[in-house]
Image (cartoon, rainbow, N blue to C red):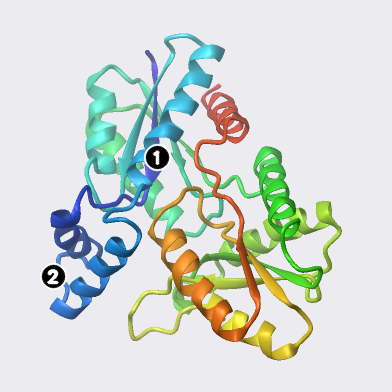
Amino acid sequence: MTVGVVLMAYGTPADIDAVEPYYTHIRHGRPPEPAQLADLIARYEAIGGISPLAERTEAQRTAIARRLDEISPGRFSVAVGTKHAVPFIEDTVAALAARGAQEIVGLVLAPHFSRATIGEYHDRAGRACEESGVSTYHRIDSWNLEPAYVDFLAGAVAASLAGMPERTKVLFTAHSLPERVLVGDPYVDELHATASAVADRLGLAEGDDWSLGWQSAGRTPDPWRGPDVTEVIDEIAASGAHDGVVVCPQGFVADHLEVLYDLDIEARARATDTGIAFGRTRSLNDDSTVMAALADRVVEVAG
């Protein structure tokens, strides 16, 4: 093995007891208030007790590693490193270096680049490479227009629309970010480019047939990018122009809290309250075609 691959993801608590230290890490060492902690625990309990994100991420790792081994047997070693839970990014990089990695490729399991999110992952991995004596760090910044990914989303939207009323609007969503970090940042443009590519394949017109929305904004004093998905659902219902909404969480690549709770519970409840039908596209998870395409990108940057 000469090339290590660190697949980076947000991370999730392993069980309910791990929610508080996980939340504390997100808050840069500041423990959450009791009400904040209780609210987060209640959300996990509402989706079955814990998020499936760790399991889904491991399945993605397995699929990418399998494809890499088919292309170049024994050359790549693939490991997961997360931002807010074990195994942390730095520990994964150190482990790959200890196993003999002479260079490392960093791939974040999120398609759209922002300096505040994807950029931070790469900064942490790059510093860890320097500290571990790894000579070269290759970074894959974004894959928002990867053809296999766009194909997947187009198929998922088409499948969801098939079971909805004729007058249904598609709402492409992604995690909101504070407005201050979006100044001069490519995140919004990359999200719009992905949604436009999917819509073009399906013959959907922007505005009439689809739009962008935001979700899962942090609870901070700073203004976050909106409108929130629930506000858009209210607007769709109030306009009378549509009888349903299909939400496509294009900014997320696996089933986890922001999909299973924020959309499947909160957004669905808002649609029900306003009297319109609700649909949500299937999550990418470890789709073999997209995982193979990501593996091919790793090979491309590793040379």
| Residue drawn at 72 percent across, 64 percent down | 164
Q: Nearer the viewer, residue 196 or 114?
A: 196
Q: Is residue 67 left or right of residue 165?
A: left
| Residue drawn at 59 percent across, 62 percent down | 186
Residue 31: which numbered mark, if any?
2
Instruction: Kindly state the secondary structure of the residue where label 2 is placed.
Output: loop
- Looking at the rendered image, the quarter that the C terminus falls into is top right
Q: Quadrant of residue 48?
A: bottom left
Q: Is residue 83 left or right of residue 182?
A: left
Q: Residues within 10 Å of mark 1 (few under 14, many from 20)?
A: many
Q: Residues within 10 Å of mark 2 (few under 14, many from 20)?
A: some
Marks 2 & 1, CB-CB < 8 Å contact: no
Q: CA distance from mark 2 to mark 1?
A: 26 Å
Q: Amino acid at mark 1?
A: Thr
Q: Amino acid at mark 2?
A: Pro
Residue 1 to residue 294: above or below:
above
Residue 236 x/y as whole percent: 68, 82
* Total labels drawn: 2
Residue 84 to residue 33: above or below:
above
N-term mark: 2 or 1: 2
Q: Is residue 192 left or right of residue 267?
A: right
Residue 259 x/y as whole percent: 46, 60
Residue bearing the label numbered 1: 57
Q: Nearer the viewer, residue 243 or 233?
A: 243
Instruction: Kindly state the secondary structure of the residue where label 1 is placed.
Output: helix
Residue 179 x/y as whole percent: 48, 78
Can residue 55 be spotted in the picture? yes
| Residue drawn at 36 percent across, 47 percent down | 52
